[in-house]
Amino acid sequence: MATFGTLSDRLTQTFKNLRTKGKLTPADVDGTVREIRRALLDADVALEVVKEFTGKVRERALSDEVNKALNPAQQVVQIVNEELVAILGGQQRKLEFAKKPPTVIMLAGLQGAGKTTLAGKLAKWLKKEGHTPLLVASDLQRPNAVTQLQVVGEQAGVPVFAPEPGNGVGDPVKVAKNGVAEAERKQYDVVIVDTAGRLGIDAELMKQAANIRKAVDPDEVLFVVDALTGQDAVNTARAFQEGVDFTGVVLTKLDGDSRGGAALSVTSITGRPIIFASVGEGLDDFEPFHPDRMASRILD
Ligand code: GDP
């Protein structure tokens, strides 16, 4: 996986330099923390997250935890690993299902983030897990969005509820509501509502998403964010948190040559966990997100 390549290499090099030392002086610790800080900033991790992260690493690296360790350098690597897991959310957060079906999952994010593809991936994964999902096409903004959802629905072998005369043509809120009603009627146990995205943050789009949220009262609102967008991802995440108050995050395009910034910032900035990762264009390129595995990948 190309993701985190540079960050990973830089951290590895930093630790290699550290390993040549026996006991660590405060100057060794400061030098190491400085290098970690630079590597994270170059990977586009948000400044406030970098500050908090390096602050914690420094404090722990100067404590007895390291001083008294048999292998101080190894202990510092362990601390960095633990703090990485922490900023990635700590424990794995699983998708939450409604006590009484159908579970409603709403997707939100900018156009091009990979939302529609994600809808297909999620539907396929849910089906494999024994669920009976229904996809709902509430993205009526982009030409072809409905057709695109129908295509991924077909690939996933999952039905798609799409606007047609009588079920809310032109009104995404109505389509979403009717989609959920259809699921109740036909006993689908999960409804995935795809919503419109724009290229940039847009007040009208956000209002529409908020209205859909109000209308269908979702169990999960997943903010879909392209890991390649670096620093911008933080601003987008903040805007969507304010606009739709999402419950979880899906990182997409983690297969690309992303520098990792979005992945490492979004949970700290919003307090919302990353639940899934999208790692390619195919419908199977999708996995539940594990903070500890991601941290190990970075420190590999
Ligand atoms: P939407 O506008 O948010 O619905 O985005 P789409 O689902 O249409 O995806 C935009 C583009 O990104 C498409 O060309 C997808 O094939 C591609 N894409 C989506 N997810 C991934 C991913 O995880 N990895 C890669 N490499 N490409 C992806």
Image (cartoon, helix red, strand yellow):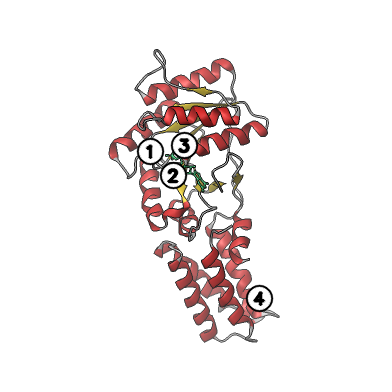
Q: Secondary structure at mark 3?
A: strand
**Label 3–label 2 contact, CB within 8 A:** no
Q: At which x and y percent is residue 84?
A: 56, 62
Q: Secondary structure at mark 1?
A: loop
**Label 1–label 2 contact, CB within 8 A:** yes
Choose mark 3 or mark 2, whichever is in front.
2
Spot the residue most to the right: 70
Q: Secondary structure at mark 4?
A: helix
Choose mark 4 or mark 2, whichever is in front.
2
* Label at residue 197: 1
Residue under numbered circle 3: 107
Instruction: Give the CA separation, mark 3 to mark 2.
Output: 11 Å
User: Label 2 amino acid?
Assistant: Ala
Spot the residue most to the left: 203
Whether residue 251 sits left or right of residue 21 in the image: it is left
Residue 37 drawn above or below residue 129:
below
Q: Return the disc, 3 or 4, that comes first in the chain's sequence.
A: 4
Residue under numbered circle 4: 74
Instruction: Give the CA separation, mark 3 to mark 4.
Output: 41 Å
Q: Is mark 1 within 8 Å of ligand 1?
A: yes
Q: Name the residue: 63% across, 56% down.
A: 293
